[in-house]
Image (spheres, helix red, strand yellow):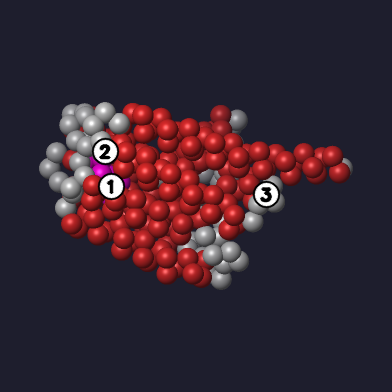
């Protein structure tokens, strides 16, 4: 499916807006899109989180596309996905009454990955990395940590940073709202990155913001663990 999606991108898109020759950019876009589909599934682990992320990315990609003067269909696809996610979030907000499952999270990851690939194809690679930055960081760092200690990375687990926060006593809706607030900051940075000479500063600021939230979630999980050890 990702291969078919790449074939549907405009001519020259695999060069990431001229940043790389297509022979190098093509495999990178393929692997990045494929990883995004999978991580979107991995991150669907608490009530409301995927709905919040889908709304954020749908609106964020539309804002960047509009400011960058991209085609109308590229501007409208994001709000359509955001509207669908908002309708679902009504039922999925904590305590959830319905859930996405693989059949929901995988297609959403694929479609949002297509919108991000389109941004990168237009030369806005920084924006395409900043907008989903929290999901990219949480999933990639968690998988990397598990791989380094020899865990079976393909098995289900509850070691993501957002899961550690809920294990530390944070309710699902509080974690989702934190991610939503961070996504608002990232959307502003993504818009900033489209200005000449601002891509790297915006990307650096996004990394700092993401690191602060990841650290907050990690501390929340450690706080409950330490409390249990003290009680024991």
Near-viewer residue (179 or 42) = 179
Residue sitting at 48 percent across and 45 percent down?
182
Comparing marks 3 and 1, which lies closer to the viewer? Answer: 1
Dot 1 or dot 2: first in sequence order is: 1
For the question of whether residue 218 can be seen, the reply is yes
Q: Nearer the viewer, mark 2 or mark 3?
A: 2
Q: Which residue is mark 2?
A: 194
Image quadrant containing the C terminus: top right
Give the numbered dot on residue 64: 1
Please report the residue visible at 57 percent of the width from the left and 67 percent of the height from the top. Answer: 96
Does 74 sit left or right of 91 as displayed?
left
CA–CA distance in space, label 3 to label 1: 35 Å
Q: Residues within 10 Å of mark 1 (few under 14, many from 20)?
A: many
**x%, y% of residue 174?**
59, 54
First to last magenta residue range:
115-121
15 sits to left or right of 125 = left
Residue at which label 3 appears: 167
Residues 228 and 37: in front is: 228
Contact flag, marks 1 and 2 (Cβ < 8 Å): yes
């Amino acid at each position: 499916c990702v291969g078919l999606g790449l074939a549907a991108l405009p001519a020259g898109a695999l060069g990431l807006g001229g940043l790389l020759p297509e022979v190098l950019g093509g495999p990178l876009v393929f692997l990045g899109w494929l990883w995004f589909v999978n991580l979107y599934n991995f991150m669907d682990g608490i009530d409301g989180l995927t709905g919040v992320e889908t709304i954020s990315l749908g609106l964020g990609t539309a804002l960047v596309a509009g400011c960058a003067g991209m085609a109308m269909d590229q501007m409208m696809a994001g709000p359509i996905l955001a509207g669908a996610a908002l309708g679902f979030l009504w039922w999925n907000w904590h305590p959830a009454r319905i859930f996405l499952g693989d059949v929901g999270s995988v297609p959403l990851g694929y479609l949002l990955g297509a919108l991000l690939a389109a941004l990168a194809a237009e030369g806005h690679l920084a924006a395409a990395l900043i907008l989903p930055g929290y999901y990219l960081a949480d999933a990639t760092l968690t998988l990397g940590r598990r791989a380094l200690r020899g865990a079976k990375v393909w098995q289900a687990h509850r070691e993501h940073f957002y899961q550690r926060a809920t294990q530390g006593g944070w309710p699902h809706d509080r974690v989702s709202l934190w991610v939503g607030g961070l996504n608002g900051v990232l959307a502003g940075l993504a818009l900033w990155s489209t200005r000449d000479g601002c891509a790297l500063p915006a990307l650096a600021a996004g990394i700092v913001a993401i690191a602060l939230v990841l650290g907050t979630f990690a501390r929340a999980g450690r706080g409950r663990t330490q409390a249990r050890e003290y009680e024991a």
